[in-house]
């Protein structure tokens, strides 16, 4: 997953795809649109290749062997399966009342954790384009440059995510899974707080709306560091070691 994220975000941070695929630039599709379109083409190629490898590698029983089963036996199996599915769902929801308080605590913290993650995952590059580069999606190149820089920051995020995932088991054995999970949630909250502070400082420096002005190096480096560091708690959240 981390390797795929790194390659995907690296694709998004590159601004020269339209030169490699010049046919993507049309009267209705400018350079930014062409770069996005090229990334989609690369995505389709990768999906086709990986799907072919998966399908060709899987061993499935022949249809001729399956057709030897009688129709009444198949109908009986479907009926039994439907009853089993109803019983399974009823038992699944019925087990909720037997959960101890510790399990409910884990479920609550997990829900709150992902409530915090989803806005970041949805608007991370938009935040970089608007709050750090001071760009407008409808005018000027600043926003597009910020989005590409956000993709580069997410690539760094994925690098730390992969490293943390590899070291997760060893760290949890040493410090305890619950402690690592709780510490990662606190660290995630501090990183989000740092994003608010960085955006506040960037807004009051006064380079917004100044043509193609780039953000100060300190602001940009701070934003990149925060994005990269968020890969650590994200790796913990994806594996959720407390379970």
Image (cartoon, rainbow, N blue to C red):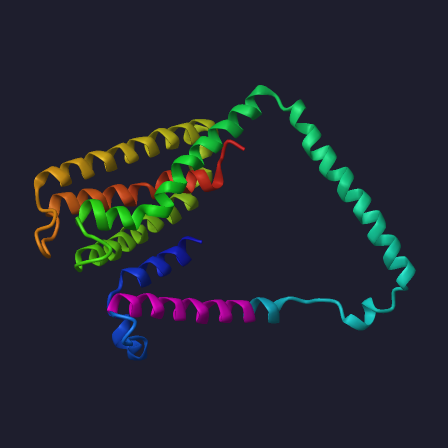
User: Which residue appears at 70% of the width and 29% of the height?
Assistant: 94
**Most prominent secondary structure in the magenta stretch?**
helix
User: Which residue appears at 25% of the width and 57% of the height?
Assistant: 148
User: Which residue appears at 29% of the width and 55% of the height?
Assistant: 151
Residue 54 position by quadrant: bottom right
Which residue ends up furthest to the top in the rendered image? 101
Q: Quadrant of the N terminus?
A: bottom left
Q: Nearer the viewer, residue 145 or 138?
A: 138
Residue 56 position by quadrant: bottom right
From what the image shows, is residue 194 above or below residue 125?
above
Residue 50 within the segment the image draws in magenta: yes
Side of 72 relative to 107 (left or right): right
Q: Quadrant of the C terminus?
A: top right
From what the image shows, is residue 211 above or below residue 107?
below
Q: Position of residue 137 (x, y in %)?
A: 24, 55
Q: Nearer the viewer, residue 179 or 6?
A: 6
Q: Position of residue 81 (x, y in %)?
A: 80, 48
Residue 85 position by quadrant: top right
Side of 116 relative to 136 (left or right): right
Span shown in magenta: 31-52
User: Which residue appears at 90% of the width and 58% of the height?
Assistant: 73
Side of 196 relative to 118 (left or right): left
Q: Position of residue 231 (x, y in %)?
A: 35, 44
Residue 71 within the segment the image draws in magenta: no
Q: Position of residue 214 (x, y in %)?
A: 11, 53
């Amino acid at each position: 997953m981390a390797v795929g994220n790194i390659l995907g975000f690296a694709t998004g941070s590159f601004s020269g795809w339209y030169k490699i695929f010049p046919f993507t630039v049309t009267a209705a599709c400018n350079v930014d649109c062409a770069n996005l379109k090229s990334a989609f083409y690369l995505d389709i190629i990768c999906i086709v290749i990986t799907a072919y490898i998966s399908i060709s590698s899987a061993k499935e029983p022949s249809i001729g062997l399956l057709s030897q089963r009688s129709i009444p036996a198949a109908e009986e199996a479907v009926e039994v399966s439907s009853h089993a599915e109803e019983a399974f769902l009823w038992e699944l929801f019925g087990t909720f009342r037997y959960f101890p308080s510790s399990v409910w605590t884990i479920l609550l913290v997990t829900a709150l954790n992902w409530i915090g993650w989803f806005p970041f995952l949805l608007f991370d590059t938009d935040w970089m384009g608007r709050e750090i580069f001071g760009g407008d999606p409808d005018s000027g190149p600043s926003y597009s440059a910020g989005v590409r820089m956000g993709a580069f920051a997410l690539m760094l995020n994925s690098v730390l995510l992969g490293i943390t995932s590899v070291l997760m088991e060893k760290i949890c054995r040493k410090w305890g899974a619950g402690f690592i999970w709780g510490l990662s949630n606190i660290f995630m909250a501090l990183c989000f707080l740092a994003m608010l502070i960085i955006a506040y400082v960037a807004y009051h420096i006064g380079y917004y709306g100044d043509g193609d002005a780039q953000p100060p190096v300190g602001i940009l480096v701070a934003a990149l560091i925060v994005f990269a560091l968020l890969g650590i708690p994200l790796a913990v959240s994806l594996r959720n070691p407390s379970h």
